[in-house]
Image (cartoon, rainbow, N blue to C red):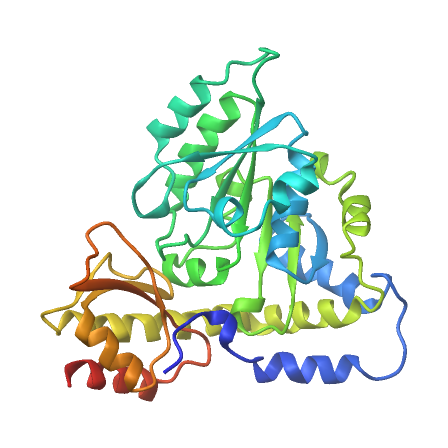
């Protein structure tokens, strides 16, 4: 009953097999291999668009490199106040960009509110030398609270950003989970809605260590190859990253794995709804659940071996705590049912 994170899961068998196949013979180094060449074509097919692909091994590197490509050192990057780039990346976006300022914006359920974004933009008039200059907007899909942006939500925020000359980045660490929830195409959820580049995640959804910066707008990709090298993410044996991503995209594996994780989250949520003392923060839209439980229930679950993180929320007290539950491609129905069974005592 490990619901701490989808990072805690192992490697999907199909991706492990792909790594084994890639471990035969020799291949050109630093991304000049056939795996990486095929991967770019595969991403072009998936997104129905000519794209540039920069594989890396961590989501933090993908986010920081992508934002550094679109925000100068004196730039402002607007993000949700709960965004991973703001709270959980140890200043990497600021360091990689040479000092760009992250500007947090509010909004319910970790989604940026359009009116609040406009208000924050208004505080930074263009051309005033005393202020950082608005440069980029970053959106997390799915969000840190397990909610998702609809295509029209992204398009509306992108329109506001475009009016001020901002470029739009998407943190897609759980992009597959969002797509599986929304049932829209990758193209519709990204460049067709105004996204210029994205961090495409696979590690949380079955890969060993594989992420990529996907660039839809060629104007922003000119120096990314150099930034990646300088950051230490141009792997000499890049084929082992590209092979993971290639297998991840093969025959829709990435969406099947995400759909399973989402369905396990829905299964847990259904069980929680039937427990009167449980209070769901919101119905899960991807693979994360936030629920407030009496402290005694939290202790009983821990004592029974369930693993999860406490996640402080407004309204928590000594009597009841919010916990975060994250399901993955490897979560089983038996795990979810046992968790609910223990909760019910």
Q: Is residue 297 visible?
A: yes
Q: Position of residue 120 (x, y in %)?
A: 42, 24
Q: Position of residue 267 (x, y in %)?
A: 27, 75
Looking at the rendering, which quadrant does residue 293 occupy?
bottom left
- Residue at 55% over, 74% down: 206
Q: Is residue 271 visible?
A: no
Q: Position of residue 85 (x, y in %)?
A: 53, 46
Is residue 175 rendered to the left or right of residue 32?
left
- Residue at 50% over, 44% down: 86
Residue at the top extreme? 128
Looking at the rendering, which quadrant does residue 55 occupy?
bottom right
User: Vertical placement of 219 versus 150: above or below?
Assistant: above
Quadrant that contains the C terminus? bottom left
- Residue at 45% over, 52% down: 141
Front-lying residue, 193 or 321: 321
Is residue 26 rendered to the left or right of residue 215?
right
Is residue 111 rendered to the left or right of residue 340?
right
Residue at the front extreme? 318
Tally the marks: 0
User: Vertical placement of 157 versus 228: above or below?
Assistant: above
- Residue at 67% over, 41% down: 95
Looking at the rendering, which quadrant does residue 66 occupy?
top right
Quadrant that contains the N terminus? bottom left
User: Vertical placement of 65 versus 182: above or below?
Assistant: above
Front-lying residue, 115 or 302: 302
User: Vertical placement of 225 versus 259: above or below?
Assistant: above
Residue at the left extreme? 276
Q: Position of residue 162 (x, y in %)?
A: 52, 26
């Amino acid at each position: 009953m490990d619901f701490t994170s989808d990072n805690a899961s192992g490697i999907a068998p199909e991706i492990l097999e792909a790594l084994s196949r890639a471990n035969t013979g020799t291949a050109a180094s630093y991304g000049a291999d056939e795996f990486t060449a095929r991967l770019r074509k595969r991403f072009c097919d998936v997104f129905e668009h000519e794209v540039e692909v920069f594989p890396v091994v961590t989501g933090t590197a993908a986010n920081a490199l992508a934002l550094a490509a679109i925000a100068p050192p004196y730039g402002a990057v607007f993000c949700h106040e709960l965004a991973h780039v703001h709270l959980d990346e140890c200043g990497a976006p600021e360091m990689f960009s040479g000092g760009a300022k992250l500007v947090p914006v509010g909004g319910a359920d970790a989604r940026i509110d359009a009116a609040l974004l406009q208000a924050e933009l208004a505080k930074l008039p263009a051309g005033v030398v005393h202020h950082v200059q608005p440069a980029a907007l970053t959106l997390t899909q799915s969000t840190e609270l397990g909610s998702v942006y609809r295509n029209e939500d992204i398009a509306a925020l992108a329109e506001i950003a475009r009016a001020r000359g901002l470029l739009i980045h998407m943190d897609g660490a759980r992009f597959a989970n969002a797509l599986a929830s929304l049932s829209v195409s990758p193209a519709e959820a990204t460049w067709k809605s105004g996204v210029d580049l994205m961090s495409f995640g696979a590690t949380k959804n079955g890969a060993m260590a594989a992420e990529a910066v996907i660039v839809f707008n060629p104007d922003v990709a000119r120096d990314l190859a150099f930034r990646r090298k300088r950051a230490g993410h141009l792997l000499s044996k890049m084929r082992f990253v590209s092979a993971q991503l290639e297998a991840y995209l093969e025959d829709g594996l990435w969406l099947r794995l995400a759909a399973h994780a989402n369905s396990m989250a829905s299964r847990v949520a259904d069980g929680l709804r039937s427990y009167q003392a449980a209070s769901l923060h919101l119905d899960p839209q991807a693979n994360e659940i936030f629920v407030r439980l009496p402290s005694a229930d939290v202790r009983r679950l821990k004592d029974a071996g369930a693993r999860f993180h406490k996640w402080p929320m407004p309204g928590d007290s000594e009597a009841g705590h919010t916990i975060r539950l994250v399901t993955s491609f490897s979560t089983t129905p038996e795990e979810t049912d046992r968790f609910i069974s223990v909760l019910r005592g």
